[in-house]
Image (spheres, rainbow, N blue to C red):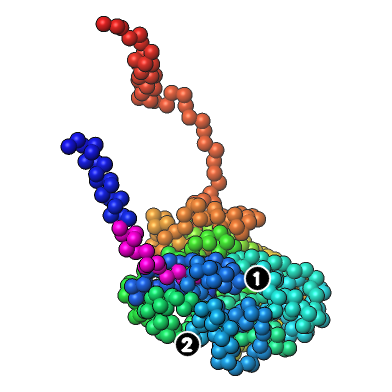
Amino acid sequence: MSVAVTRIQSILLAVGLGLILVGCGADRQPLQVGGKPSPENQIIAELVAELATEANIPVERRIGLGDSRLMLAALKRGEIDLYPEYTGAGLALLGLAQPPDADPDATLQLLRERFSPLAFGWSEPLGFENRPGLAMLGDRARALGIRSYSDLARHADQLALGVDSEFRARPVDGLAPLSRRYGMQFHRIVELEVRDRTELYDQLIDGDLDVALVRSADAQIEIFGLQVLEDDLNFFSRHDAALVYRQAALQRFPALGPILAQLSGAIGDEQIRALSRRVTLRGEDPREVVRAELIRLGLIDGKVGEKDRQALSLAVSRSANADGEAGAVLRQLRRSFPTSHVNLVRSPDPLGSVAGASTRLALVSASAFFSPGSVDPATGHPPLRPGLEAVALVGTSLLHAFALEPDVHRLEDADVIATGPEGSSGYSAAQSIIDGLQLSATLLPVEGETADTLADSLIESGADVAILMQPAGNSTALTLLERGLLLIAVDNWNQRNNRIVFPYLQPGRLVPADYAPFLSGVQVPGLREPVETLVSQLVLAGPAPMEEITIGTQGPGASFIPRALPLTDQAVERINAAIGKTEDIYPMLPQARALAPQLPQPPEPLNPSPAASFMSLLAIAMLIWLAWLLFRPVRSD
């Protein structure tokens, strides 16, 4: 038998086996798990898919298809077997609506009765609600006196609203019915696709929108401190999460029934927000988030990978304003690194978080890079905290010196100066001021878990003066201003050689306009006139390359060797492109290699070396020989 015949027989045998296997598996079509594009919907869909896989049910994912109408159509056509849905959305698909205080059990029974003729079922509620709502920035809502939808209606013609395309089109509980119910017409309406709905938060924080459509399970509501307005006329129904499924799927996969029963009441409001936060704010994959959670709960076997050490997380001070620079930088990082874990970490020592490898970036003032108290003879400046480098310029920090005692009007009159925790920008700046002005005051670091508690700690410290080094709008500084504390001028910094020893602190002015966006037109006693102060650059910092680290003997973190990987040149370039470079970073700060000036490359010499010349000649000779072989005349024998 020839080799060719043998090969043909092998191919036919393989094809025959394949057809047999396909035929045997024809009645074992996988469970088609569907889901909408929203983060919490993807999480629930992945949860069902993972549990089904663990129960040996073959699964095919069709997650992120579209809105409720599209999902129901896919369910009718048999393109999916189940998907997560909300009771309020289910009612709207039927053209129905109920008040939010309606009996949830009666609502679920109504849905089951109406969906039963289609051979569809509704599971028991999963345990959390995800009701639509309208939200505003807290400061903006307070400035306009808006707490409810009825309040909003009186200002709507001057405001911009952001919604997703599904809400815009819904005829029962969408934008048009809502507008008719409350009699409000917005000045401008911005519409985004459902899968891009989270961008509404970006536009709201950036000030491009005044009001945005939100869902109660969204993690951004708490993160950005948004004010969800009161639906005072009870327009929206309850939106309890459940699963809509084809009855045929339960018959095809009997193990699916116990899975649905297992999920009954299993996911609370706080749990879905925590999982959603990992997806929306940290950029993690929903499938990995769900798998890690199931492993943690012991519901499936496996091992959770340690990815957080190299996550692109951003450390900020505990008093950083999420509506200001911190929130803006966080959003820019997420846009530039959509597949990375980018989240906000509040820390008493943001640079220490980078040093400890718990974050990759920190938002700090330039003063935080230094450890005042002595001067390095090699540089003439206080020693640098080792293992760190600046990667991007974000803005400006201003020194806020508050008089805690009424009879203290100058820094020289203070016996005790309170400031933030050791390692913070304020602590380094305060120590620099004590050294530079040769003050006899004692420096007292205090801590607080929140902006308000830090303000309380400063006031209750017994100090004469409180010093913060933060951008305008810092939450703690704003709290102290609103409590009536006065700012002290720093107008003698140019004495001696402070501009040389402490070049990261430069004279500047704190003016009322700096706080106008945060005070909403309200004047505070402490900032009615410009105040002489000091300014510094606000920068992003990351871990320096290992080969550039030197072990120091002074300052916090001096003996530290970082474990976190430094950012690549490409990452630094992307960050700077997203933030937008306005000026160069202070030259005394260690900086990422990608920020160094790029010198033009000189032209290569024509004859770089004798060896290169020889290789060029050899290549030319080979080409000539190949050409001769190709075109030589063939002699006939």
Badges 2 and 1: C-beta atoms under 8 Å apart? no
Residue 583: image location, x then y, percent: 64, 55
Q: Residue at x 61, y 59 (%)?
A: 579
Q: Residue at x 47, y 54 (%)?
A: 568
Q: Residue at x 46, y 78 (%)?
A: 247
Q: Amino acid at mark 1?
A: Glu
Mark 2 — residue? Answer: 265
Quadrant in which residue 299 is drawn: bottom left
Q: Residues within 10 Å of mark 1 (few under 14, many from 20)?
A: some
Quarter holding the C terminus is top left
Q: Is residue 537 magenta?
A: no
Residue 448: image location, x then y, percent: 54, 84
Magenta range is: 20-34
Mark 1 — residue? Answer: 166
> Looking at this view, is 229 or 349 the one in front?
229
Distance between the alpha carbons at the discs numbered 2 and 1: 27 Å
Query: Which tag, 2 or 1, sits closer to the chain's start?
Result: 1
> Looking at this view, is 308 or 588 the one in front?
308
Judge whether residue 471 can be spotted in this image: no
Q: Amino acid at mark 2?
A: Gly
Residue 177: image location, x then y, percent: 74, 78
Secondary structure of the residue carrying tag 2 is: loop
